[in-house]
Amino acid sequence: MPTYRDQALVLRRLDYREADRILTLLTRRHGKLAAIARGVRRPTSSLGPALELFAQVDVLLARGRNLDVVAQAVRVPGPRPDPDPERAAHAALVAELADRVSEERQLVPGLFELVASALAEVSRDPEPRRPAAWFMMAILQLGGYGPRLHACAVCERPLPEAEAGFSPAAGGLVCADCVAPGMQEVSVRALKVLRVMASGSIELYRRLKLEPPLLAAVEQVLESQLEYHLDRRLRSLRVVRQMRSA
Ligand SMILES: [Zn+2]
């Protein structure tokens, strides 16, 4: 069987047969793909320890008829996925989003690097919500549906320095004249945070003081924009929300 090497992130794992697993891998050069790791659930498997969920690995893959086969896997040095439930829930959110925005074998330039750094940050940031929120904005922008933050998404006029509405269907913030009943309200502070995120300046973002209610308002905008574009609720988001309200 012809083989190829790549770097991969383990986005999903599914137990298969007696001791195998089917993995969803996001690779650096071949996009997202499914691969089978044979015998990986046996304690003696040399692949098992490397192929943890959300881990980054160097893999040797053999082309199979249906699924490619993991022939070798070596962990890339770096932070290990953390079993802490809050970190794990945010890592799951990052992985689910990466899975949902990518098609099999279609390389999205920049996606691997973005997901790798988000998973690393989520496993070491004292507050995993922050890198997860940053990732949500980055993934929206990568897909070309980042929310409009400078002009009203309905009438196109520049937004004043004031509270605004938010409409995922319109694709962004909405001025006071266009706001409709029931729309989410976005404070000036939340708007400013969103603009910093959209500018891509992670250094500035890291310096922002984000109390939980402010971060929650920012998350709400990003989450509703994502769910609107993905046309479906995100399972991992439900877990994260339950955790926050607990
Ligand atoms: Zn307007």
Image (cartoon, rainbow, N blue to C red):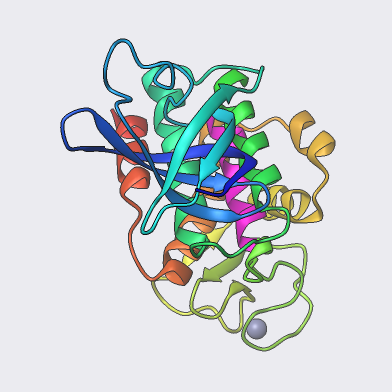
Residue 177 visible in rendering: yes
The location of residue 46, given as percent across then percent down, is: 43, 16
The location of residue 212, given as percent across then percent down, is: 52, 32
- Please identify the residue farthest to the front as the structure is shown: 1
What span is colored magenta in the figure? Answer: 126-140
* Residue at 42 percent of width and 63 percent of height: 227
Name the quarter where the C terminus is drawn. Answer: top left
Question: 78 or 196: which is nearer to us?
Answer: 78
* Residue at 52 percent of width and 48 percent of height: 219
- Please identify the residue farthest to the top as the structure is shown: 44
- Rendered position, 120 above or below 49: below
How many numbered callouts?
0
- Please identify the residue farthest to the bottom as the structure is shown: 155
- Rendered position, 95 above or below 168: above
Residue 128 part of the magenta segment? yes
Residue 187 visible in rendering: no
Residue 231 as seen in the image, left or right of residue 188? left
Residue 164 as seen in the image, left or right of residue 184? right
* Residue at 66 percent of width and 61 percent of height: 108
Question: 78 or 191: which is nearer to us?
Answer: 78
Quarter of the image where ligand 1 sits: bottom right
Most frequent secondary structure within the magenta stretch: helix
Residue 170 part of the magenta segment? no
Location of residue 113 by image quarter: top right
The location of residue 80, given as percent across then percent down, is: 54, 17
- Rendered position, 92 above or below 217: above
* Residue at 42 percent of width and 37 percent of height: 92
Location of residue 75 by image quarter: top right
The location of residue 20, given as percent across then percent down, is: 27, 33
Residue 124 as seen in the image, left or right of residue 238? right
